[in-house]
Amino acid sequence: MVSNETADEIQEYLGVVPSWIEALPDSAADHSWSVVRDLQLGETELTRREKALVAVGAGAAIQCPYCIHFHREEAKLEEVTEAELAEAFAVAGTVRNFSTVLHGAEIDHEEFEAETESIVDHINEQQAAAPGDD
């Protein structure tokens, strides 16, 4: 259970103290809210819109109906369109799909990193040579 001070703060931010906060053990409740407040709701390097898209994609990838519902609603608050949500789900699905392939095929991690570095170098070279970038 969260402290009274934290409960008041959550009430101010969200209008309610969600049941999932109440389900946390005392030793983690206040800290867990701090993470949500500072990382998800706070001003960070990512915009709230970007964080909502990351979160809804991650929720879909881990197949969490709670995360999908909450972060879809969060995305709507940030005016994310249905087309953008569909793309976020597709990107998350692609990452999950290829993670399965990479792990199942037991692709050598060092070789994968070297190939990725080569790909990045190639793309950087292409972008540097692209006309009209002056």
Image (tube, grey):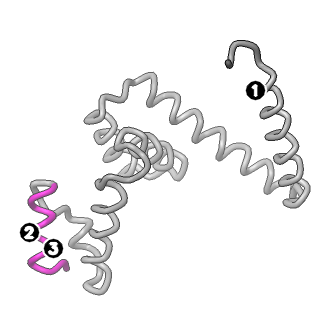
* Residue at the spot of label 2: 8
Quadrant where the N terminus lies? bottom left
The amino acid type found where label 2 is placed reads Asp
What residue sits right under mark 3 in the picture?
6
Counting residues from the start of the chain, the first of labels 3 and 1 encountered is 3
Whole-angstrom CA distance, mark 1 to mark 2, is: 51 Å
Task: Name the residue carrying label 1.
Answer: 127
The 10 Å Cα crowd at callout 3, few under 14, some 14 to 19, many 20 or more, is: some
Q: CA distance from mark 2 to mark 3?
A: 5 Å
Q: Nearer the viewer, residue 125 or 120?
A: 125
Amino acid on which disc 1 is placed: Gln
Q: Position of residue 34 (x, y in %)?
A: 29, 70
Residue 39, given in percent of the width and then of the height, sits at: 36, 59
Against 81, residue 34 (above or below) is below
Query: Can you say whether 22 is above or below 76 in the image?
Result: below
Q: Disc 3 marks which amino acid?
A: Thr
Span highlighted in magenta in the image: 1-13
Check disc 2: other Cα within 10 Å, few if <14, some if 14-19, many if 20+: some
Closest to the observer, 119 or 14: 119
Q: Is residue 57 left or right of residue 19?
A: right
Q: Earlier in the sequence, mark 1 or mark 2?
A: 2
Taking the spot 66% from the left edge, 44% from the top edge, the residue there is: 95
In space, the residues marked 3 and 1 are separated at their CA atoms by 49 Å
Q: Are marks 2 and 3 in contact (CB under 8 Å)?
A: yes
Magenta-colored segment: predominant secondary structure: helix
Question: Element at badge 2?
Answer: helix
